Amino acid sequence: MRWHRQLRWKLFLSHLAIVVVADIVLLATASFLARAGLSQDLPLSLGAAAAETGPVLPDATANDSLQRQFELVVQQALLVSGFAALATAVIVSLFVSRRIVEPLQAISTVSERLAQGFYRERTLISSDDELADLSRSVNQLAATLEQAEDRRRMLLADVTHELRTPLSTIEGYAEGLLDGVVQPQRQVYGLIQHEATRMRRLIEDLELLSRAEAGQLTVVASVTNLHGLLGDMVRQFQPQFAVDSIALELLLPPSLPPVWADRDRVRQVLINLLTNAFRYTPEGGRVLLTAQEQGAMVQVSVADSGVGIAADDLPNIFERFYRVDKSRARTSGGSGIGLTIARHLVYAQGGAIWAESEGLGQGTTFSFTLPVAYGADGAEVAPGV
């Protein structure tokens, strides 16, 4: 932003303009009154008399008259310049305050509307100063709130759909069992239990997200061996991936150091990432689970050969309620909270998490870091998490 467009300089220049106008008026008034007033009191014959008889000194009466005239000239000049400065100050203040107050009133009005839940409100300020920056910030906040509200509504619709489906299944089989239409077989009870488990998992995810965003996640960190943990995760998911002919591979260096982390929380993160990779990797694809030391951290990555993520979606995928698959079809995509939970779990353990993708159809790599448990000297390191 150029200096002359900043509010501080606009205010400084406005005050400077008042001072300059006052000085100019003061000088001009004093000069005019001096020429008009003092010249009248000086006797015109004084010069001629001096030529004839020599220098003539003014008497005391003439000195008093000149002094009074000088004081009058100064008073008049100050009075005129004061009124000129006052008029200039009023005009400049009205102009400057209008350029400042009106945008502030517009921003205040939009802020009140946002507080009332009208997230589509926007400010319209065309200036190029700090007020315009404030206006853009308010508009950005409004856009973020609007997006969050849209995702909240989408979440409610998704949760309603997710809960309605298993509830309808359970209710239908229960009515069938009561009416004798459905025979009480082990397969029927297994299906009811599966739908109930599905409901419980969704409710637990919502509860975990609520605790995470409230900063109430419990993390019990300890020295954790990733070789065993990642191996267990591969063995757990291998049958599920094999059904769709998706290759699940594990690649670890032999000298991978232990990390300072909560084993159960790391399992939750990996479950979310592997489930996400399975969901978006087509049949015959490949998912690679790797880990490598990166200085004082260990980076764990889940890379798939799936559908990939568009560049516009990458910055938002860890936000709550956000789903890359925005369709209402539930054949793919989750409720939009799995990756948000994973992010909170990683942050709570002193790490970071991010996603990379070359674009649609190019696969996706999710990576997160965990602090190394031992320093270079072999002493145990227990980061505050």
Image: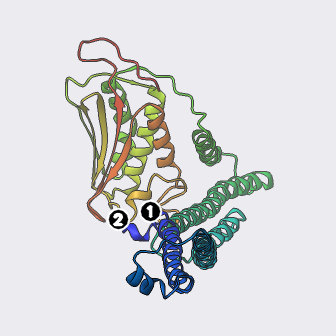
| Residue 351 rendering spot, x and y as whole percentages | 39, 35
Q: Which mark is residue 108?
A: none
Residue 306's place in the image compared with 22, above or below, is: above
The number of discs equals: 2
Give the residue at x 53% y 82%.
42
- Residue 353: x and y in percent read 38, 43
Q: Secondary structure at mark 1?
A: loop
Residue placed under numbered mark 1 in the picture: 324
Residue 108 in the image: above or below residue 298: below
Residue 22 rendering spot, x and y as whole percentages: 54, 74
Q: Quadrant of residue 154?
A: bottom right
Q: How is the model colour-coded?
A: rainbow
Q: Give the vertical position of 385 relative to 268 (above or below).
A: above
Q: Are marks 2 and 1 in contact (CB under 8 Å)?
A: yes
Question: Is residue 120 visible in this depiction of the protein?
Answer: no
Q: Residue at x 69, y 58 (%)?
A: 168
**Res 218 quadrant in image:** top right
Give the CA separation, mark 2 to mark 1.
Answer: 9 Å
